[in-house]
Image (cartoon, rainbow, N blue to C red):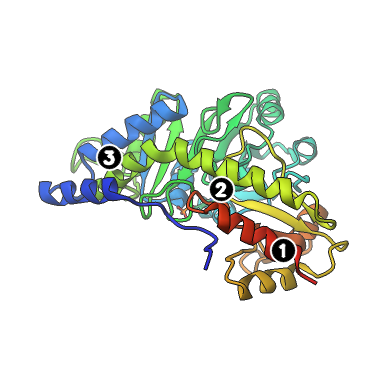
């Protein structure tokens, strides 16, 4: 069995967790501070604030930017649902813009949907490929919009040599399937001192000084147990990323020769959270049949995402809208294993099985 994702946890993580347990300090403390500093340095920003997960990171970032009732936030309908959910959770309105063949938001379509109520753009660096941040930042500057990067799938990804999460306010997730994990966990990155201080309060019941509350906030804190795992995972991330990129290069070198399959963009800054191909109508069998064929032969695959956000039951007010590229791609995407634990033989097996499907 070759799984679609497999967290890589070693003796270092085990020891780090046991050290925290031995210390008796389980909630937020020294380890969180150490993890935050290391992560800020890695991304190349002044501040990193740890949160309980990627969703709460995004939620806190929106609150910190005073995005709320009646505000519009431009984002993509082709993402994990959390991206849009947090916009709704603060009372704002998601405004969807279709993607292009990179699977990321098509920046050329953004300006057409800007209204006087538009407050922010929330690009997603989907599957580990940076969104077109040059165009997005230029549009944001011109129209005085905020930018909140959903970098939950893109730890260490770079756009024109600059790490995602450092263009504006960045949000990361450390869920077990992501490029690095803390079990559950998240992080917000920023260079803004005032914003960072506000976020620290938002995730801690509006409090800076214990039992004194300046406004109503949440408990979105990370634990020292999780942070201890994160410190070790972050040390290993560059090696993980390199393996993901090597695996992706091998898969693309083989799959690009197979008629009817379309390989993903092979950009140097892509960290391949997912390796996602398109099974086009020119391929001898449909996407779902190929998926079944791989599953039967012990190869884990997944469809990210089978139903775009604007077509979800939770988003009835968007059912009449259409995003043609998103809707087509949702029928054709198939993610193959690309994680760091794949062996050369696993990779060869994946190609062998795909090559012999009829
Ligand atoms: C994983 C993910 C999230 C949410 O992160 P959690 O840690 O699962 O809450 C948000 N956006 C995207 C694009 C994600 O992949």
Q: Is any atom of residue 37 visible in this view?
A: yes
Q: Is residue 307 above or below residue 35?
A: below
Dot 3: what SS? helix
**Front position in the image: 60 or 335:** 335
Question: Residue at the location (60% across, 51% down)?
Answer: 274
Q: Position of residue 1 (x, y in %)?
A: 52, 68
**Front position in the image: 99 or 284:** 284
**Front position in the image: 124 or 356:** 356
Q: Residues within 10 Å of mark 1 (few under 14, many from 20)?
A: some
Looking at marks 2 and 3 on the same chain, the residue that comes earlier in the sequence is marked by 3
Dot 1: what SS? helix
Q: Is residue 331 above or below residue 102?
A: below
Asked if the beta carbon under badge 2 is closer than 8 A to the nearest atom of ligand 1, the reply is yes
Question: Residue at the location (59% across, 24% down)?
Answer: 161
Please give the label number shown on residue 32: 3
Question: Residue at the location (80% across, 50% down)?
Answer: 257
Q: Where is residue 98 in the image (x, y as percent from the top left)?
A: 76, 48
Question: Residue at the location (15% across, 47% down)?
Answer: 25
Q: Position of residue 305 (x, y in %)?
A: 65, 60
Q: Is any atom of residue 78 visible in this view?
A: no
Q: Name the residue under label 2.
A: 273
Which residue, as the protein is rendered here, is positioned at the far right?
A: 282
Looking at marks 3 and 1 on the same chain, the residue that comes earlier in the sequence is marked by 3
Q: Is 319 on the left or on the right of 304, as rendered?
A: right
Q: Where is residue 237 in the image (x, y as percent from the top left)?
A: 44, 39
Nearer the observer: mark 2 or 3; the answer is: 2
Mark 3 and mark 1: Cα distance apart in space: 44 Å
Q: Name the residue under label 1.
A: 354
Asked if the beta carbon under badge 3 is closer than 8 A to the nearest atom of ligand 1, the reply is no
Q: Is the C-beta separation of discs 2 and 1 under 8 Å?
A: no
């Amino acid at each position: 069995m070759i799984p679609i994702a497999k967290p890589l946890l070693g003796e270092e993580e085990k020891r780090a967790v046991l050290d925290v347990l031995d210390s008796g300090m389980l909630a937020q403390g020294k380890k969180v501070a150490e993890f935050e500093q290391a992560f800020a340095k890695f991304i190349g920003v002044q501040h990193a604030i740890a949160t309980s997960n990627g969703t709460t990171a995004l939620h806190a970032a929106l609150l910190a930017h005073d995005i709320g009732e009646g505000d519009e936030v431009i984002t993509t309908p082709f993402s994990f649902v959390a991206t849009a959910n947090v916009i709704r959770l603060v009372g704002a309105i998601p405004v969807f813009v279709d993607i292009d063949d990179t699977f990321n938001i098509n920046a050329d379509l953004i300006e057409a949907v800007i209204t006087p109520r538009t407050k922010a753009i929330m690009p997603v660096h989907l599957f580990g490929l940076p969104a077109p941040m040059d165009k997005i930042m230029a549009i944001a500057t011109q129209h005085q919009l905020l930018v909140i990067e959903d970098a939950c799938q893109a730890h260490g990804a770079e756009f024109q040599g600059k790490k995602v999460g450092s263009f504006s306010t960045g949000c990361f997730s450390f869920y077990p399937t992501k490029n690095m994990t803390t079990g559950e966990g998240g992080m917000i990155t920023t260079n803004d001192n005032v914003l960072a201080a506000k976020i620290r309060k938002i995730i801690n019941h509006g409090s800076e000084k214990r039992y004194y509350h300046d406004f109503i906030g949440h408990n979105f804190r990370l634990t020292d147990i999780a942070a201890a795992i994160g410190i070790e995972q972050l040390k290993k991330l560059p090696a993980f990323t390199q393996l993901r990129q090597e695996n992706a290069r091998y898969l693309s070198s083989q799959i690009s020769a197979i008629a009817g399959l379309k390989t993903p963009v092979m950009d140097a800054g892509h960290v391949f959270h997912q390796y996602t191909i398109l099974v086009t109508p020119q391929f001898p069998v449909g996407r779902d049949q190929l998926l079944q064929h791989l599953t039967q032969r012990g190869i884990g695959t997944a469809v990210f995402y089978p139903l775009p956000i604007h077509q979800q039951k939770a988003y009835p007010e968007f059912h009449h809208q259409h995003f043609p590229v998103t809707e087509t791609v949702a029928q054709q995407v198939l993610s193959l294993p690309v994680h760091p634990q794949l062996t050369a033989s696993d990779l060869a097996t994946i190609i062998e099985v795909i090559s012999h499907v009829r």
